[in-house]
């Protein structure tokens, strides 16, 4: 399981970022709270993550702090709430 990610913030959008690590860019879905706490692109970031895997896709979700990640994990444990809904 991927629990943290650290690298250079390559691109920052409202709901997704790209973190570059050794030449590879990792797309991560983020919340508004995480977006507000991130620096400008080009700076190093360290975030907590949740790696969601299904038979159809693999998604990486990134969080500014561990409390936000814990809340996200509680939400996705509720029947009918998926990770894309919980990240909002």
Image (cartoon, helix red, strand yellow):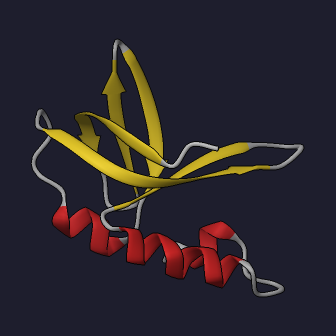
Q: Is residue 11 left or right of residue 17?
A: left
Q: Residue 33: where, in percent of width, then height? A: 29, 74
Q: Which quadrant of the structure image shows residue 32? A: bottom left
Quadrant holding the N terminus: top right
The residue positioned 18% from the left and 57% from the top of the image is: 38
The residue positioned 89% from the left and 44% from the top of the image is: 55
Depth check: give the residue in front, 26 or 7.
7
Q: How many marks?
A: 0
Q: Residue 83: where, in percent of width, then height? A: 65, 68
Quick check: 18 above or below 28? above
Depth check: give the residue in front, 31 or 68.
68
Q: Is residue 53 left or right of residue 37?
A: right
Residue at the far top in the pictured view: 23
Q: Which quadrant of the structure image shows residue 78? A: bottom right
The residue positioned 70% from the left and 42% from the top of the image is: 58
Quick check: 26 above or below 40? above
Q: Residue 10: where, in percent of width, then height? A: 25, 32
Q: Is residue 38 left or right of residue 40?
A: right
Quick check: 76 above or below 21? below
Q: Is residue 45 left or right of residue 62?
A: left
The residue positioned 18% from the left and 65% from the top of the image is: 37
Q: Which quadrant of the structure image shows residue 57? A: top right
Q: Residue 9: where, in percent of width, then height? A: 23, 37
């Amino acid at each position: 399981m991927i629990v943290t990610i650290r690298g250079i913030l390559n691109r920052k959008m409202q709901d997704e970022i790209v973190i570059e690590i050794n030449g590879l860019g990792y797309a991560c879905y983020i919340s508004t709270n995480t977006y507000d706490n991130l620096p400008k692109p080009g700076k190093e970031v360290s975030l907590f993550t949740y790696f969601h895997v299904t038979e159809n896709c693999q998604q990486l979700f990134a969080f500014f702090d561990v409390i936000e990640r814990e809340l996200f994990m509680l939400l996705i444990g509720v029947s009918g709430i998926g990770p894309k809904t919980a990240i909002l």
